[in-house]
Amino acid sequence: MVKYVLPLLVAATLQCNADCRDSLPRQIRNERADFVYGGRTWRLSPGCRVAGNLLTVEIPGGRWGDTQWAKTEIDLAPYAGRGFQCSIRVRGEDIAKPTEPWLGFKFMLKWSDRFSGAMHYPGAGAPPNSFPWRTVSFRQTEDFRGADGPGVLHLGLQGTSGRVVFDLDSLEIGDLQPIWPVTNQTLRCVYTHDVASRPVARGVMSPSGRDMTEDDFRTISSWGATLLRFQMVRDWHGVGTNQDLDDFDRWLDGRLEHFGNVVLPLARKYGISVVLDMHVTPGGRDASHETNMFHDKRFARHFVEAWRRIARRFAGERGLWAYDLANEPQQQCASAPGMDGWNLQRMAAEAIRDIDHSTPILIESNVNDSPRAFRNLSPVALTNMIYEVHVYGPDDFTHQGIPGFSVRPTRWPDESLGWNRDYLRALLAPVREFQLKHNARIYVGEFSAVAWATGAENYLHDCISLFKEYGWDWTYHAFREWQGWSVEHEGPDADHLAPSADNPRKRALLEGLRQL
């Protein structure tokens, strides 16, 4: 995880930065009169033309960097508390690289949260250059509480040039449908005696921007941690990064060298087990935060082979608690058969099991490892599979004051909003149901609240108490990473954080780490 973007909460919603948000209304010029098709009223910019069911949006090369699109309002009220998905068929011709990563092809919905007023921009990406007819889609997950007025759907191009053609007859807006296969519904997870008898593990995530040191291990050991989630991460919220596979392998080899030569020996010395976390995957993500390997066989094959190579190196290593296959998978669009997020994790797990027959393997849910996505998560039919979830919710509390999230100060608990321990229990209910139905071991890989959130210590205490009640392993996000998540800092906002040897958030975490 890095300074300002927490992937669980990006989920299906791409949060544009302030420049992007401000540009949306200004860049549409000379919109034409309304156009009615299929019962919807569309507003067209000059670069749009309609022939039958086909909407063509074009920006000539000489006007490169312009914006042209068609817009229509969408009533989102029926989807509050349920979420929704949008899809359409489209083809592209000669689409240039956009001026900014979040620009380019646009199939995007703009809406304002009725509680916080925060703007959201879920949307679907598409490749540059030219592409044949394909269906693109995006999803707004079950945590959608409702919008302040209708959403505005945008179809077109922004900050680029080229041509896109949309089939208006194919536009669909409706209830969420499972995008990963639903299978193995009667399966009961099997664990070897060694794994089943492990005590509950509690700890922290490693720093993301530097190597681990002995002082780091000495500190977390003194706090009472028994588990470290070691992040192998770079360019976490970059667009189109990690696509040079030779370069990816060189970087990954460097991280594995540090893990094998420094992290594992120090972990053994201080009595701490370690999760090996592939925090970024081959191919990275696109502008809509979609995990690219779910749609590109080259990246998918490299992902599976990378885990085969890792297993050959670390099978049987004492102190290796689990392999964490893919941090916060994000899939909104249908993939080629067998390339979805569940199947790719399954194939990587099978590749590991060909070599390492016992080390646990972690499977994460869709929508950035959301608790709600456990409703459509299937267990994998292998021994010693552990299921990981990330807990950040409500984001109006945990992420308040971070760009792209709510600017309204909130507190925990807040009975007027129903924010209390029972809220968390309801949030985690799909995970608990999965645990009981499948006899699954559950690991909370990440949870946190920003340093300046009033009552953050109460939030941490409530989370940890539920994890203890359910018998879940956990690691706090994060240790000596961004100061906003650090329990060794405190302050009123992101710009005024200072080192803190003792504060309520730190005491809540240490109490949880030291509990029996």
Image (tube, rainbow, N blue to C red):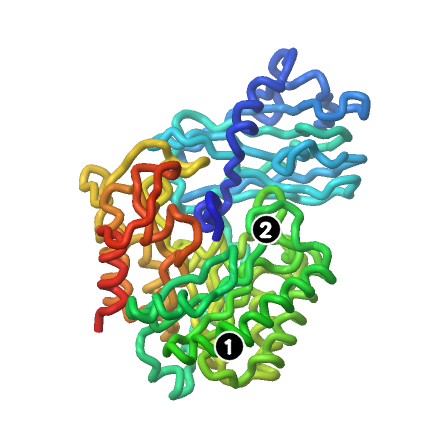
User: Residue at position x 26%, y 51% from top?
Assistant: 459
Specify the amino acid type for callout 2: Asp
> With 214 as the anchor, is 504 left or right in this view?
left
> With 439 as the anchor, is 84 left or right in this view?
right
Q: Quadrant of the C terminus?
A: bottom left
Q: Is the Cβ of the residue at disc 2 closer than 8 Å to that at disc 1?
A: no
Residue 419 placed where, x, y %?
24, 45
Can residue 271 be seen here?
yes
User: Residue at position x 76%, y 35% from top?
Assistant: 95
Give the quadrant of residue 430: bottom left
User: Residue at position x 37%, y 50% from top?
Assistant: 485
Residue 24 placed where, x, y %?
57, 24
Specify the amino acid type for callout 1: Ala
The image shows residue 293, relative to residue 99, as above or below, that is below
Residue linked to disc 2 = 235
Residue linked to disc 1 = 381
User: Residue at position x 81%, y 22% from top?
Assistant: 62
> With 160 as the anchor, is 225 left or right in this view?
left
Residue 248 placed where, x, y %?
68, 60
Q: Secondary structure at mark 1?
A: loop
Residue 421 placed where, x, y %?
22, 53
